[in-house]
Image (tube, grey):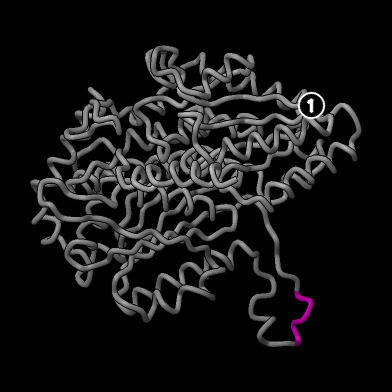
Amino acid sequence: MKKIILPSGFTFDYTNLFTSWGVTEADVHTYFDSIAGAVKAAVRVRSTGIVDGHLSKDGQPEAILFPQLPYIEDKNLNNETVLKRLEDLGRHAKEKVDAVVSFGIGGSYLGGKVLFDVHCGEFWNQKSEAERDGYPKLYFSGNNVDPLRTNELIATLKRSAAHKGAPYTVMLILISKSGSTIEPMSNFMVVQKALQEAGIGVEVVAVTDPRTDDKETLLHKLAVQQNWPTFAVPDGVGGRFSVFTEVGLIIGAVVGFNIREFLNGAKAMDEACQGGDPLKNPALLNAVLKYIAAEKYGRIIEIMMPYGDSLKSLSEWYVQLLAESLGKHQPKTDGRYGRTPVVAVGTTDMHAQTQEHQEGRLNKIVSFVKVKDWGTEAVVPHTYDEYKPLKAFSGLDLGVILNTALEANSEALTGDKRFNVTYELPTLSAFHLGEFMFMLCWAIFYEGQLAGVDAFNQPGVEVYKKLLGPKLAANQTEK
């Protein structure tokens, strides 16, 4: 077995990728100079924030600051003042707020959704106030412009208010760096107006670019005018990395998620990912193996397949992280790079996608995510032991069945020489979640260096935005 096991118990099992029928030692040696260059670039970005060739979307030099995020220090984006403000907001939400609606899209939505799903689970809003330890219900909006869902959300909030009776307070968390992002801003304005007209108490918190100079954003200006509390969408941290900033942490804060432990997990992983030996650095090894698998063996699709419903949003977060970071033009070679991420959930997608994984084109890597100990039990009773197929799994805990299914899936793929890896989290805790997500961030950095792409810009996204504005203006003219 080939594994990196960290002191925390976090495990990266790459046995079924780094093998005689997969990526080989000879392959890795071929890229020795590129790997050394990626390690050198990591040292540089940690100490200076500089990544060669990176410019902001305005064409200006821009520091890359995600490596500092796990460290709560005065000079850093995450410092005691920031953490205490978030914790104060969490206490206020617990004591004074009945429901929260978070408005954001992309990195302003996906990271916070992971924290919510892992900490709260699917049925949070159906729990009693006591079961939520006093924390408010939480809903997400602004990640699409779906009128049906937005009206259903408004109706749900009105029903809750009517059921409780006055006073009923809803906190609207508006997350947009610019303040002109269509999806969150349009939904926010619709929901705010509807709640105010219904006599429901509304509080607004803005998470936006904190600058107050001549580049002050629309949302920051609006927040100052309306006297809304503000938190920061910082420069130097792209949205897909921003779960470790106020952008993501604010969602954790208002539901009682342990944001300090989350950052501690990220810190532990950051320390593990600083060495130059791929066999000891999980993020570097992850990047090297998947890069070679794509370039030499055509494995250009990655199936991110956690086993557990509460981790589906982790796959969705990873889709943006991988696609938006690495699907790029390679300026030095005038080539193109990218691996296509696909969301899957075990065991759900063993009954949907696995047929293609097992017998389809040899263009995929399957990345399994396993939680070793779920911290809860649900044992199948011996109710129908007279039926042999049902007796086969009677007496087993659902967590055991889940992880055994993962093992069977991995073994089946390996038997047909299908590339796969497994990440194992000892428990589904804030610490281990921070570890894993930060490892993936560093893996993307290293792979971007190997591929010769800027992992921190998104020029392809700007193309449609330039077309959308005039089209919306034309619709207004027609009306």
Q: Check disc 1 and report its element: helix, strand or loop.
A: strand
Q: Residues within 10 Å of mark 1 (few under 14, many from 20)?
A: some
Relative horizontal placement of residue 251, taking residue 72 as reference (left or right): right
Q: Mark 1 points at which residue?
A: 201
The residue positioned 19% from the left and 70% from the top of the image is 20
Residue 221 falls inside the magenta stretch: no
The residue positioned 72% from the left and 46% from the top of the image is 153
Total labels: the figure holds 1
Against 350, residue 8 (above or below) is above
Residue 298 x/y as whole percent? 23, 68
Q: Tag 1: residue type?
A: Gly
Residue 337 x/y as whole percent? 22, 55
The residue positioned 57% from the left and 58% from the top of the image is 308
Residues shaded magenta:
382-386
The residue positioned 64% from the left and 16% from the top of the image is 226
In this rendered view, identify the residue nearer to me: 255 or 174: 174
Against 418, residue 426 (above or below) is above
* Residue 114 in sight from this viewpoint: no
Residue 362 x/y as whole percent? 29, 75
Quarter of the figure with residue 129? top right
Residue at far front of view: 478
